[in-house]
Amino acid sequence: MKIQAKLGYTAAGLTVLAAVLVPFLLYGLFTKGFAALGLHVDEMYSGGPKVRTIKTAAYSIVIHRPVSPHMLQSEKPFVQLDWKPVSALAGHVSDVVDVDGDGQPDIRVSFDVPKDPKTPLRVNVEALNPHYEAMRNVGKERFSKLIVRVDDAILVRVPLAQR
Amino acid sequence: MAPVTEYFIFGEALVLGLSSGPACLASCGPVLVPSLLAERAGVRRGTRYLSTFLGARFLGYLLFAAVAWELGVLVALPPALRLSVVGVIHVLLAGVLLWYAYSVGHACARSCGSELVTIGAVRKRGISGPAALGFLTGLSLCPPFVIASVRAAELRSAVAALLFFAVFFVGTSVWFVPFISLGCVRRSQAVTTVARMAMVLIACFYLCLGLAMLMGRNVYGH
Amino acid sequence: MATEARILPHREIAARSIGRSVLLTLPIVLWSLLIFSNSFRQSNRSVQMAGIITAVFMIALFFMMMRTWSTYRWRRWFFVALGLLFPVGFIHTVMVMRGSMGIPMEEMIAGRTPFCFMPIPLLILPAALTRTVVFPGSILPGGGMSSSGIAAMVGLWLAITLVVGKGWCSYACFFGGIEEGMASVPKRAKLRKIDPRWRYGPWAVLLAMVLLSLALFEPAYCMWLCPFKAVSEYVAARNTLGMVQNGIFIALFAGLVVVLPLLTKKRTQCAFFCPFGAFQSIFNKTSVFDVKIDRTRCSPCVLCQNACPTMSLTKESIAQGETLMSCMKCGACVDVCPKHAAVWHIKGTEVAVKPERARLMLLYAAWGMAVMFGGTIIAQGLAAILHVFV
């Protein structure tokens, strides 16, 4: 048998072996390899990493790092704030939040917390710092401007005012 | 303004252009890559194509900047008006892409030598395809252009603003040079057909986007 | 190329013996028992029954492939079952978990959008340039519908592609079976003359979608063009634009997956549109298995060309003794050839010398993947149906 044919059959045999190894070895290997690449989901979806937590008596407000869209995304830059746990929130929430941690109030966020978790949420944001955009009766307008309930938290995304 | 400060400003323009280059590439890519692939092969032809495209894009930049400066609205263009302007340009771009894809099929044979594809054959003098595409791409207010215009608007004179744009443009154009290598790709029926089909698809996308913008909806606000 | 004609057994006359067929099927029996052992042990009757039925189904099909020497028609049963039962299982799970096929923004923000293999080629450039995956999922298991995570799907895709190359489109894709089923319904094609340039469609869609995905930083194909959104899930329409997008999905599904396969008896979505298929064609260059035409035996009658569901055989390629890069290794051409000129082949070996050995090795690898991946999906869909009755 020619050497090419031998190599061909060897490769074919290894392919069959690889097929057997897929569920026991290869699948896990490639999955871990991909996870190890250090990629992250676009922050436009994930909301950016958490940077600070403001604790109140009953609940906490988690502040994320402001997200800047990639140059060609037409979403606005925004900052995400999480109120959790939802079970500890009163029927109406109105909080003044120091977003950037400079000791000065930046925004006032007001929203109702309906008992039925499937009821759509609406939020009003008053901009005490012109760096943030005001929002009036906003629901789920866009990824950079919304209020949603995710599990046991209410997420509010406030767009940053652009020059 | 002292000459040293002026150099700093143009240095800033160059750096801004270099850092915005990838975004420019990504923005122009859907128009540039298929149309470049639809051209006949050859590094010289590719260079000619790219030079024409970039030159026309530069004219588009300057034209918009000059008009906007003259009208005093370089920075203060209302969002609704900006949306309409971009919408019109997207619709025109879609039209040119479709016409270009059609014209590739009728591009002159070897006897025409190194002519680039022309669109429209009115009295045998068509518009250069890459020039039309480059010009419209230059007018389309991509984000790097907007950033440069914000900075340029702070300069004292229209000439300084235009020079700022020119240097910024040179910075972005550096990133386009590797695309000359697309001229090395052998042009078979497969490559040309794929390029033409891709142009049609992208044209349909720009058409939808442009029409939505003209109806006042910014599509990519989701 | 064979230097002298070699005569293969006349399959129409003599099927392979039952004993030999059983022997050759034994590895698949063991493999199926291994893969479905978990479901056999489940307390949930519908899951148990689904596992048993699927295992028997896959074993029976492989046995018939061995007994009848043919591949295509038996593989097609599996593939159609996969295409029909995947939406059943998926939609059932989606409705149970969130009550709607529309993906709400909450799910996207929470990273719970399930990741299918289609956007893989579109995400490469944005990931390479910015280390960002422009898909609203989770890299690792994210819970909800995204129980496995993006890494798991990519890992699975890579592993299966390593084994079968573009055979993915015949043995793993859980969408292609719908149109393969549609294409097999009519006895004759009503539309027979198809411009061969439409074969370049998938590459054009791939090029356009890769460029647009990079420009817009989103999976453009999923947002605008995927016909299979009609049978899985889609971004919930919150405005006119969302309605337009959903209209496009439904129109493309109706046209490319239902109507055109009925008219042409071709897998039109796969052959003329699917960008993932174009991307997967690249892996035909790395796969060790392919299909060759033995020119010493070929008439040419072009029966193979007509039978190919993706137009991967042309007069020129037949003259050169090979298929095009788009060959999915479905086996249609091999089974239809009356002269046994179209044969399975291992790269590096002589054409038409022991082609059955090549077929066996391909089938052990490909069917192993089919049982592991497609079989599991079939079982899930079956369990959803059986749950109503059991």
Image (cartoon, coloured by chain):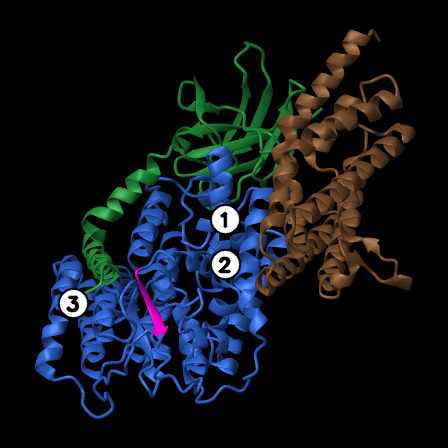
Q: CA distance from mark 2 to mark 1?
A: 9 Å
Q: For this view, does A11 lie left or right of residue A47? A: left
What chain is tagged by disc 3?
C
Q: For this view, does C236 lie left or right of residue B3? A: left
Q: Which residue is mark 3?
A: C28
Q: Label 2: few (<14), some or many (≥20) within 10 Å?
A: many
| Residue type (three-letter) at the residue carrying disc 2 | Pro
| Residue type (three-letter) at the residue carrying disc 3 | Ile
| Residue type (three-letter) at the residue carrying disc 1 | Leu
Return the disc, 1 or 3, that comes first in the chain's sequence: 3
Discs 2, 1 touching: Cβ within 8 Å: yes
Q: For this view, does C29 lie left or right of residue C124? A: left
Q: Position of residue C379 (x, y in %)?
A: 25, 65
What chain is tagged by disc 1?
C
Q: Mark 2 vs mark 3: tell me if same chain.
A: yes
Q: Which shade is chain C?
A: blue
Magenta region includes residue C290: yes
Discs 1, 3 touching: Cβ within 8 Å: no
Q: Position of residue B175 (x, y in %)?
A: 63, 34
Residue C275 got which mark?
Answer: 2
Q: CA distance from mark 2 to mark 3?
A: 32 Å
The chain whose colour is green is A
Stretch in magenta: C288-292
The chain whose colour is brown is B
Q: Label 3: few (<14), some or many (≥20) within 10 Å?
A: many
Q: Which residue is mark 1?
A: C122
Q: Is residue A149 above or below residue C86?
A: above
